[in-house]
């Protein structure tokens, strides 16, 4: 590497969608870092205008395949507020099971197949299978299990239509639920073993810097992936309806995703943010795993997001077991009906990679305005800031042999979802 | 089925590419947990950026392409892939028809919508209205779906590996729905697009008591005008049917609906 150089990582591999990283170096100093979102814009917020809530719910999962049910769930929460739909508790229970399925699918895909090959020194997980066959085989089982839940609750593995306004088309039967519960119990051992694998890893420190965290606060005193309040690492709480004041957006020319700041500075969302803001609420094996892995560096180092995902895998498996117990005791829920045809609603859930916001204005049963803010669009500025810090550290210490890989690992640790973020567009009718 | 032995390929060189879409079709391949290790074994995967680093971008026997063409850069990239691939397979609704982002295809609203969203910002590559890949290059085979189905995908890959011509998909969702013994939702006067939608999903939505939204795009043998007439007779407005059928119809639906007029007018 010369003192003035340009590093172009394109395409960025093992992430979802088309992205790249451009780093410009002048006089051994980094002058510019761009995480480029090169995937074309789809303008989703313009596609749903004039559509019925039913059509919206069919369309929005198509924003992103990996977290399709999080999009569906955020949309449901927003639309049900807008149209005053009162959800029976049993429906909420089944939505939680659905959401845990997606967390397991997405986290296991990212942790074992997209991230771990870097730590073990392979191009991909299949190449890793020769030496780490058991991990890969078990990881495939865990991922298949997440998919099975998504299929059961969603109606198919990807883009299922079963979750509908007010409920579900069909609720799984007792036998299926008990089978899922049994399988969760079996897989828990592997999820716990994963903690030991991670505990052995050496985590690079070159990029470490302070940042801010944001996630949504569950409406109970436990850990969870949904809520109507946003909490931030400065100790403040914000109503989700105020999201546009909390998250400041702007457009940059190197990205079809908008960029976001909180109080003028980059921030992180995702498993690590949730763990740092809500980790003390964990129970059971998840709590043990958190206590085993957690250290102070988590506040300054995004690579620990992989660790946080591993803990959430345990949390979700334990939650599936517990939530199915609750579901088995309940009557089949009826589909709740909307009480009005016009209204405004903001729905927020934690997608696997962070806070996801769907905001709607519905007029006479048709969408008049929609705004979607995805986690990747929230954390892109934070990735750039960590790459800048890491790059400067590596340049000044002359450790530039695998600088590209180091940059890629920072970006990958966030589990960015480029399809999601490239649709992050806000339509302003002014 | 005629076996073209002279075309038999040993360990075909495969590239799997994603353009603008949700990555669901590539993800479906990654999600074939019981097949993925076999697949990586049976073919020589030269490029699959979503799953592996260090792609080798050279000659290919088969390129699988997901996503619509939505930027100038993507137009150039797809041509470059075509130049070095013997066979190109359009994979999923976005590559086949343009996807939901092409639901307003050719209505002239794109420039206005992009301005509404991004203002006057000039990007490093110019966005273009979403098109299927066959508007830019010649496509050899189509795998419809949103996302693609595992059985159809593995059948196509299997045939290509063995040098056998893949079969065209000609059956509608209704056929699979009947085989699954579902109650017909049209009998309940529901807006179901099953009769005119390409099959392969296994009637995913009617299996859950929900109408088909048409996400696999048009079935070429569908009787479109008759479905419009039937739905209109249920009291569903012409515009309503037209809007829904275009949600996933992209560019491919246009020729089937151009002559269908609102009878009430």
Image (spheres, coloured by chain):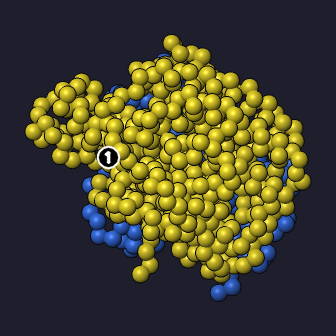
Chain colours: A yellow, B blue
Given residues A116 and A28, the one toward you in this image is: A28
Of the pair A305 and B173, the residue shown nearer to us: A305
* Picture mark count: 1
Percent x, y of residue B32: 62, 32
Residue pictured at 29% horizontal, 54% vertical: A254
Q: For this rendering, which residue is in front, A75 or A46?
A: A75
Q: Name the residue furthest top.
A: A131
Residue identified by numbered label 1:
A384
Tell me which residue sits at (81%, 54%) in the image: A90
Local packing at callout 1 (Cα closer than 10 Å; few below 14, some 14-19, many 20+) is: many
Residue B201: % across, % down: 69, 46
| Residue drawn at (77%, 37%) of the image | A321
Please determine whether, in this image, residue B183 is positioned above or below residue B115.
Answer: above
> Is A193 rendered above or below residue A246?
above
Q: Is residue A237 left or right of residue B117?
A: right
Question: In the rendering, at what x and y percent does residue A362 appear?
Answer: 61, 76
Protein chain holding label 1? A
Apparent side of residue A248 relative to residue A396 in the rendered image (left or right)? right
Residue B44 visible in the picture: no
Give percent across and percent down for residue A44: 50, 63
Residue B226, image quadrant: bottom right
């Amino acid at each position: 590497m010369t003192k003035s150089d340009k590093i172009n990582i394109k395409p960025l591999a093992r992430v979802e969608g088309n992205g790249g990283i451009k780093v410009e170096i002048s006089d051994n100093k980094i002058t510019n870092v761009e995480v480029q979102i090169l995937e074309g814009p789809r303008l989703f917020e313009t596609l749903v205008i004039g559509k019925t809530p039913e059509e919206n719910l069919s369309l929005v999962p198509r924003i992103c395949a990996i977290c399709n049910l999080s999009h569906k769930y955020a949309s449901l929460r927003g639309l049900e507020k807008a149209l005053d739909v009162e959800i029976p508790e049993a429906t909420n229970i089944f939505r939680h099971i659905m959401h845990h399925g997606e967390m397991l699918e997405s986290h296991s895909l990212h942790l074992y197949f997209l991230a771990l090959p870097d730590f073990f020194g392979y191009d991909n997980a299949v190449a890793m299978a020769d030496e780490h066959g058991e991990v890969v085989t078990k990881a495939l089982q865990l991922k298949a299990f997440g998919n099975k839940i998504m299929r059961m609750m969603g109606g198919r593995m990807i883009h299922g239509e079963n979750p509908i306004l007010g409920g579900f088309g069909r609720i799984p039967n007792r036998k299926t639920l008990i089978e899922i519960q049994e399988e969760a119990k079996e897989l828990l051992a592997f999820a716990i073993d994963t903690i030991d694998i991670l505990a052995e890893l050496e985590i690079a420190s070159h990029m470490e810097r302070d940042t801010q965290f944001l996630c949504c606060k569950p409406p109970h005193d436990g850990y969870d992936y949904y809520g109507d309040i946003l909490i931030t690492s400065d100790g403040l709480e914000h109503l989700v309806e105020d999201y546009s004041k909390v998250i400041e957006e702007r457009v940059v020319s190197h990205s079809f995703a908008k960029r976001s700041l909180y109080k003028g500075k980059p921030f992180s969302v995702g498993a690590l943010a949730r763990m740092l803001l809500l980790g003390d609420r964990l129970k059971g094996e998840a709590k043990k795993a958190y206590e085993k892995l957690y250290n102070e560096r988590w506040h300054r180092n995004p690579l620990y997001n992989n660790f946080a995902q591993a803990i959430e895998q345990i949390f979700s498996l334990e939650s599936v077991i517990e939530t199915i117990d609750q579901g088995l005791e309940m009557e089949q829920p009826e589909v709740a009906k909307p009480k009005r045809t016009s209204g405004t609603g903001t729905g927020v859930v934690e997608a696997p990679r962070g806070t996801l916001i769907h905001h709607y204005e519905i007029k006479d049963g048709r969408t008049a305005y929609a705004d979607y803010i995805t986690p990747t669009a929230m954390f892109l500025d934070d990735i750039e800031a960590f790459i800048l810090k890491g790059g400067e550290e590596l340049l000044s210490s002359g450790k530039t042999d695998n600088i590209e890989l180091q940059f890629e690992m920072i970006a990958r640790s966030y589990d960015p979802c480029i399809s999601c973020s490239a649709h992050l567009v806000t339509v302003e009718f002014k | 089925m005629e076996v073209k032995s002279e075309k038999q390929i040993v360990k075909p060189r495969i590239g799997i590419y994603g353009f603008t879409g949700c990555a669901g079709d590539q993800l479906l391949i990654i999600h074939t947990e019981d097949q993925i290790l076999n697949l990586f074994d049976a073919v020589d995967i030269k490029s699959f950026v979503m799953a592996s680093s260090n792609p080798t971008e050279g000659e290919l026997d088969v390129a699988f392409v997901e996503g619509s063409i939505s930027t100038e850069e993507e137009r150039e990239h797809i041509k470059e892939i075509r130049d070095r691939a013997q066979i190109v397979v359009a994979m999923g609704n976005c590559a086949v028809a343009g996807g939901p982002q092409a639901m307003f295809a050719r209505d002239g609203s794109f420039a206005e919508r992009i301005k509404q969203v991004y203002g006057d910002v000039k990007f490093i590559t110019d966005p273009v209205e979403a098109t299927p890949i066959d508007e830019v290059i010649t496509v050899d085979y189509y795998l419809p779906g949103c996302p693609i189905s595992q059985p159809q995908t593995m059948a196509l890959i299997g045939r290509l590996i063995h040098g056998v011509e893949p079969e065209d998909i000609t059956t509608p969702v209704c056929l699979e729905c009947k085989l699954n013994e579902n109650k017909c939702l049209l009998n309940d006067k529901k807006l179901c697009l099953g009769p005119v939608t390409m099959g392969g999903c296994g009637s995913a939505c009617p299996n859950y008591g929900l109408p088909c939204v048409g996400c696999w795009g048009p079935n070429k043998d569908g009787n479109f005008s008759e479905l419009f007439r039937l739905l209109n007779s249920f009291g569903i407005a012409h515009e309503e049917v037209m809007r829904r059928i275009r949600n996933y119809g992209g560019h491919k639906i246009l020729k089937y609906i151009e002559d269908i007029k609102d009878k009430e007018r």
